Amino acid sequence: MNTLKNILTIVIPIALAIGMFSGCKNDINEVDALTSMDNMPVEVRKGVKLYYSQNARVSALLKAKTMERYVGEEEYTVMPDGVYLETYDSTMVVTSSLEADYGIQLTEKNLMEAKGNVRVVNEKGEKLNTEQLFWDTERMEIYTDLPVKIITADQIIEGDGLVSNEDFSEYKIKKIRGIISLEDDE
């Protein structure tokens, strides 16, 4: 009986250990992906205000609650808690504003993407609503292929896709789906 007890005290822990370790599998690629520094921001900032300049003058202001910078094959910055952007003329008057739920800036491509509830307002008060908008800082234009809605003083224009200069003062809807005239009842 004592021998059986000694055997069981050795066999049971070994069996449990074998069962525990054989039930767990670690895929090396999965472990690498979870622990890779490429998936971790190298810098996280809160309450960010960034000024952009062109030809030695301030041309835009970007605000974000949170900004995370990543490096690797391609450097990029994520604004997961929303983004707000203003563009300025040469006298520092706001010419347009953009607001979105999420933003990502691809540094090497000079491209910023705004996603989720994207709203743009130009100097004339015209409003653009869409779900995704790209800002190419090199070509100085904004564009999307998704549905857009533009509200002017006297019209609501809906369509698919848009190309505009970066302050949204001159724009072209790629495929207009409808125009609603807003008339004053006098």
Image: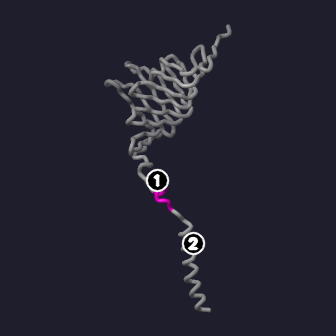
Position of the N terminus, as image quadrant, is bottom right
Q: Mark 1, residues whose alpha carbon is within 10 Å: few (<14), some, or many (≥20)?
A: few
Q: Which residue is drawn at 57% across and 83% down?
A: 9
Q: Mark 2, residues whose alpha carbon is within 10 Å: few (<14), some, or many (≥20)?
A: few
- Between 31 and 182, which is closer to the camera in this rendering? 31
Q: What element carries label 2?
A: helix
Position of 109 relative to 153 (above/below): below
Q: Which amino acid type is shown beneath numbered disc 1?
A: Ala
Give the residues drawn in magenta, as a range: 26-31
Position of 80 relative to 157 (above/below): below
- Between 5 and 29, which is closer to the camera in this rendering? 29
Position of 118 relative to 68 (above/below): above
Residue that badge 1 annotates: 33
Dot label at residue 147: none
Q: Which amino acid type is shown beneath numbered disc 2?
A: Gly
Farthest-out residue, top: 186
Q: Residue at x 58, y 15 (%)?
A: 153
Residue 66 in the image: state x and y as whole percent. 47, 40
- Between 178 and 181, which is closer to the camera in this rendering? 178
Residue that badge 2 annotates: 19
Farthest-out residue, left: 56
Residue 5 in the image: state x and y as whole percent. 60, 88
- Residue 18 in which image quadrant: bottom right
Position of the C terminus, as image quadrant, is top right
Q: Is the magenta stretch mostly helix, strand or loop?
A: helix
Q: Residue at x 53, y 18 (%)?
A: 125
